[in-house]
Image: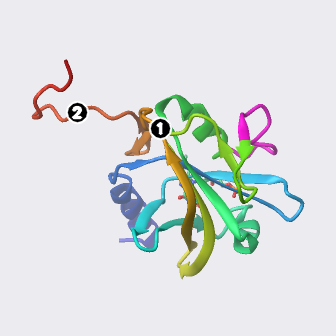
Amino acid sequence: MSAELDTRRFRDAMRRFATGVTIITTRDTEHTPVGLTANSFNSVSLTPPLVLWSLNKHARSLPIFMEAEHYAVSVLCADQMPLAARFASPIDDRFEGVEWHRGPTGVPLFEGCVAWFECASVHRYEGGDHVIFVGEVLNFGHSDKVPLLYAGGAYGVPAAHPALPPSGP
Ligand SMILES: Cc1cc2nc3c(=O)[nH]c(=O)nc-3n(C[C@H](O)[C@H](O)[C@H](O)COP(=O)(O)O)c2cc1C
């Protein structure tokens, strides 16, 4: 079997793993906001509070994240699917026309997310064609909105398992 086919099979298998969707943001040395859609986000440790995500070495934002002292993770709600698509697209100014504000460390955060985590960038690890970033959470918050999901290469929304008893009134 060719290496290319193996890579495709590996990606197809990995895509079966359902995740949420985040936008990871920071600012460059001129304070210009930078961000990309990422579903590699996960929790690592409660004490201290650590999270991780990984960034493709070909990403335009790699040099900026390598230098950044802080970044933010905005966990998107179902209504923010267009924002997920926008921050994965090659347009120049992804922040144009988008409502955002700066968190206490100056990194961009979005309005109306499911959760947000403002992090100090504490570790970076080699991860093949990606760099793995570990962040220590400095500030965070959450809402009761419905999260956006990503599975099998498509966006989705959560539904209760049919085997569970109906909830609510
Ligand atoms: C749902 C989804 C999840 C993604 N997750 C990641 C990720 O975890 N890491 C990554 O490097 N790229 C990820 N991408 C691709 C980047 O968003 C995309 O390549 C983006 O254009 C990179 O931006 P940049 O080149 O400006 O840095 C994802 C894209 C989508 C649609």
**Residue nearest the observer in this picture, 7 or 28:** 28
Q: Residues within 10 Å of mark 2 (few under 14, many from 20)?
A: few
Residue displayed at 63% across by 36% down:
111
Pinpoint residue 109: horizontal percent, then vertical percent: 66, 46
On screen, residue 59 versus residue 113, left or right, reads right
Quadrant in which the C terminus is drawn? top left
**Displayed quadrant of residue 144:** top left
Pinpoint residue 36: horizontal percent, then vertical percent: 65, 52
Quadrant in which the N terminus is drawn? bottom left
Q: Which residue is mark 2?
A: 160
Is 93 colored magenta in this rendering? yes
- The mark that comes first in sequence, 2 or 1, is 1
Ligand 1's quadrant is: bottom right
Label drawn at residue 88: none
Mark 1: which amino acid?
Ser
Pinpoint residue 67: horizontal percent, then vertical percent: 75, 73
Residue displayed at 57% across by 34% down:
112
Mark 2 and mark 1: span between their CA atoms? 19 Å
Q: Which residues are magenta?
A: 89-100
Label drawn at residue 143: 1
Residue displayed at 64% across by 70% down:
57
**Residue nearest the observer in this picture, 32 or 9:** 32
**Displayed quadrant of residue 25:** bottom right
What predominant SS class does the magenta segment belong to?
loop
Do tag 2 and tag 1 residues touch (Cβ < 8 Å)? no
On screen, residue 83 versus residue 96, left or right, reads left
The correct choice, above or below, for 95 with respect to 71 in the image is above
User: Which secondary structure, mark 2?
Assistant: loop
